[in-house]
Amino acid sequence: GGGPGGGGRGGGRGGRDDDAFGAARGWIERHPIVLKATSMGVTYSLADLSAQLFSRLTNPEERLTLEARVRRNAGLGLIGLLWVGPLLTVWFEWLPRGFPGAGGG
């Protein structure tokens, strides 16, 4: 039967949202490096924004131009996106194969 809440999808709000989340989940599973690299780039960028704010609050006489602050932030975001994120993704996927039985999970 196809009654309300049937179909093994948990009832919920309906198939449309479930399909969107399922598609997103499928994309994430197929592209883990892209997702993790992007999240690392965002993390690096937000961390730099926090550091710049802290520096400005503790050293009000330090005056970097807006262009210098933006370049610094973009550079750090790109390091996270293009280097650290992909590197750590591959590293942490390789570790369990390189050292079987050494993991905590």
Image (cartoon, helix red, strand yellow):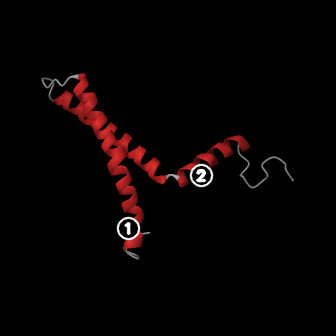
Residue drawn at 14 percent across, 28 percent down: 59
Task: Give the residue number, with chain letter if any, for mark 2.
Answer: 26
Location of residue 21 by image quarter: top right
- Characterize the local packing of mark 1: few (<14), some (14-19) or many (20 or more) Cα atoms within 10 angstroms: few
Residue drawn at 71 percent across, 52 percent down: 10
Location of residue 70 by image quarter: top left
The C terminus - image quarter: bottom left
Task: Give the residue number, with chain letter if any, for mark 1.
Answer: 95
Position of residue 78 measured from the top left corner of the image (x, y, whole percent): 33, 41
> Mark 1 to mark 2: distance in Å?
24 Å
SS label for mark 1: helix
Residue drawn at 16 percent across, 30 percent down: 58
Query: In the figure, is residue 48 to the left or right of 64?
Result: right
Residue drawn at 37 percent across, 50 percent down: 85
Count of labels shown?
2
Please name the amino acid that badge 1 sits on.
Answer: Leu
